[in-house]
Image (tube, rainbow, N blue to C red):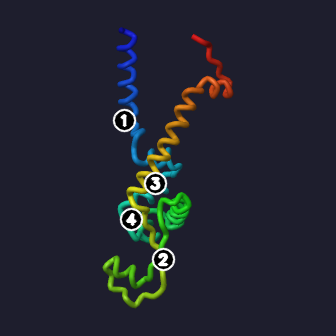
Amino acid sequence: MEVIGRQLKEFERIDDLLEKEEIFSGEKLFKCILGLNKTESKVFGYILKNQNASTSEIASKLKMERSSVQRALQSLSKLLLIKREPLSMKDYGILEKKNDSKKQGYLYVYNSKDMDSIKAQFKKLLDKWYNSMVNYINNLENLCECCGFKFDSC
């Protein structure tokens, strides 16, 4: 019984450490499940909350270089998390409530997929990741042996 009590206290201590380190934050979710870096995570989070966002708008609001935002948008587009759509400057001005009806040309705006499909995609990827982690844990001896560590049997 004493051993079980010590193990439970150790698990509580580990849980406290994980919470303090923010192991289970949204940014970590994006990184672990989707492989997104910090910039991609911020851009994706912005687009989830702001529809029809332009590259300039995202760069300005997140205080990032435009080229960094463009690279992040390309990565997010490849992962099919966001959609890139052309919009006339006139229509963009109307959306932004600016009276620039004389502007001509087009720009691209970015939107996220609908939230239900994103959640479904995340759940599917999380299940896949979870199963692969369980497999690693179940075969931990083999993983460590390939790195030069040997386990003695109990």
- Which residue matches tag 3? 41
Q: Distance between the residues labelled 3 and 4?
A: 14 Å
> Which one is earlier in the sequence, the residue at label 2 or at label 4?
4
Q: Distance between the residues labelled 2 and 1?
A: 43 Å
Q: Distance between the residues labelled 4 and 1?
A: 28 Å
Per the image, label 1 sits on a secondary structure element best described as helix
Q: Which mark lies nearer to you, 2 or 4? A: 2
Per the image, label 2 sits on a secondary structure element best described as strand
> Which one is earlier in the sequence, the residue at label 2 or at label 3?
3
Q: Which of 142 and 10 is in front in this view?
A: 142
Q: Distance between the residues labelled 2 and 4?
A: 21 Å
- Which residue matches tag 1? 20
> Which one is earlier in the sequence, the residue at label 2 or at label 1?
1
- Which residue matches tag 2? 86
Q: Residue at x 40, y 61 (%)?
A: 114
Name the spot of residue 130 as percent of width and height, x first.
49, 38
Image quarter where the N terminus lies is top left
For disc 4, the neighbor class at 10 Å (few under 14, some 14 to 19, many from 20) is few
Q: Which residue is drawn at 36% across and 9% down?
A: 2
Amino acid at dot 4? Lys
Amino acid at dot 3? Ser
Q: How far apart are marks 2 and 3 (CA)?
A: 23 Å
> Which one is earlier in the sequence, the residue at label 3 or at label 1?
1
Label disc, if present, on residue 61 of the rendered structure:
4
For disc 2, the neighbor class at 10 Å (few under 14, some 14 to 19, many from 20) is few
Name the spot of residue 3 as percent of width and height, x first.
40, 11
